[in-house]
Amino acid sequence: MDISNELAIGIDIGGTNTKYGVVNHRGQILEKGEIATEDYPEIGSFINALHTKLDPLISSLKKENVQGIGIGAPNGNYYTGTIEYAPNLKWKGIIPLAKLISEKFELPAALTNDANAAAVGEMTYGAARGMKDFIMITLGTGVGSGIVANGQLILGHDGFAGELGHTIIIPGGRIHEGTGMRGSLEAYASATGVTKTAVELLEKNSGKESLLKKYSGKINSKIVYECAMKNDKLAKKVYEYTGKILGQALANFIMFSSPEAIILFGGLTRAGDMIMNPTREHMEKNLLPIFQNKVKLVFSELVESDAAILGASALVWEMRSE
């Protein structure tokens, strides 16, 4: 077959939404769509819904052109093709996702951690092109990470290396509802963490005016962003605090692997300088002099969702080369 006709499907499973795309060898996403992950508490119904969306697409593109399916998912294990104890998903325990999807679609399937998939996408098509040492941090429903060192994605002996979102940044701090751990980065720098910070600041500053007050009991990260964009002081403080925690954590990560760059990706990056400036300030402030002013801190160059879809689809080409 002419390689120019070969296609791969990339699937990015998030705690809230699952996004998918059909990708060619040049990294162009020809078709894409999404379903709500949260709507499917059972894995079987989720796979059926995905099949209903994708099967007509595959047929229209000629199934013989589609070489396989790559999947990025929280706690996805590249070695076993399983999702294992993902705290941000409704499916509990160990889910043999690659096997289930392969059987349903009758196509080869491979799985990796969602943030690792985003890192591969960024390295191939985005801000990390040509880099051999960088860290990808995904700021969404949770906080994910993909670590590339010496040109290699760090997977560890069991496939779970790089869970930087679950590292403890404030010992004894805020509880993470999914894991029961206290003070993890994800409890502060995720969309859920931003919501909790906003609620806490509202309680501490009950006497001060804020647009957030009229959303009492209904606050989420989108509302915090909208209020901050209207120059609400309390909403902007939420990003200052979030950036402080994130920056402190990034300083630790830099001193671990000395990357050329840290690339921020995901919904929270829409806040732009409101999140970037305090993050950079507190990152540099907490670094040893030998690391200061050496590491680029940048936003992803890829359209949100595209990095993970592209990275997941690249698993298909890896499968074929093995």
Image: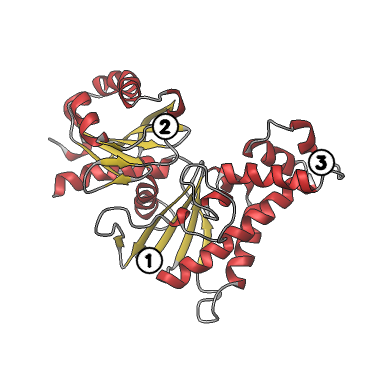
Q: Find the distance from the CA under tag 3 to the CA under tag 2.
A: 34 Å
Label 2 crowd (10 A; few <14 / some 14-19 / many >=20): some
Query: What label does residue 133 carry, if any?
Result: 1
The residue positioned 55% from the left and 55% from the top of the image is: 183
> Which is more toward the observer, 187 or 293?
187
Label 3 crowd (10 A; few <14 / some 14-19 / many >=20): some
Q: Which amino acid type corresponds to the residue marked 2 in the rendered image? A: Lys
Q: Earlier in the sequence, mark 3 or mark 2?
A: 2
Residue 226 is left or right of residue 36, and the answer is: right
Point out the frontmost of discs 3 and 2.
Answer: 2
Query: What label does residue 70 carry, if any?
Result: none
Proximity of marks 1 and 2: CB atoms separated by less than 8 Å: no
Label 1 crowd (10 A; few <14 / some 14-19 / many >=20): many
Query: Can residue 224 be seen by looking at this rendering?
Result: yes
Q: Earlier in the sequence, mark 1 or mark 2?
A: 2
Q: Find the distance from the CA under tag 3 to the CA under tag 1.
A: 42 Å
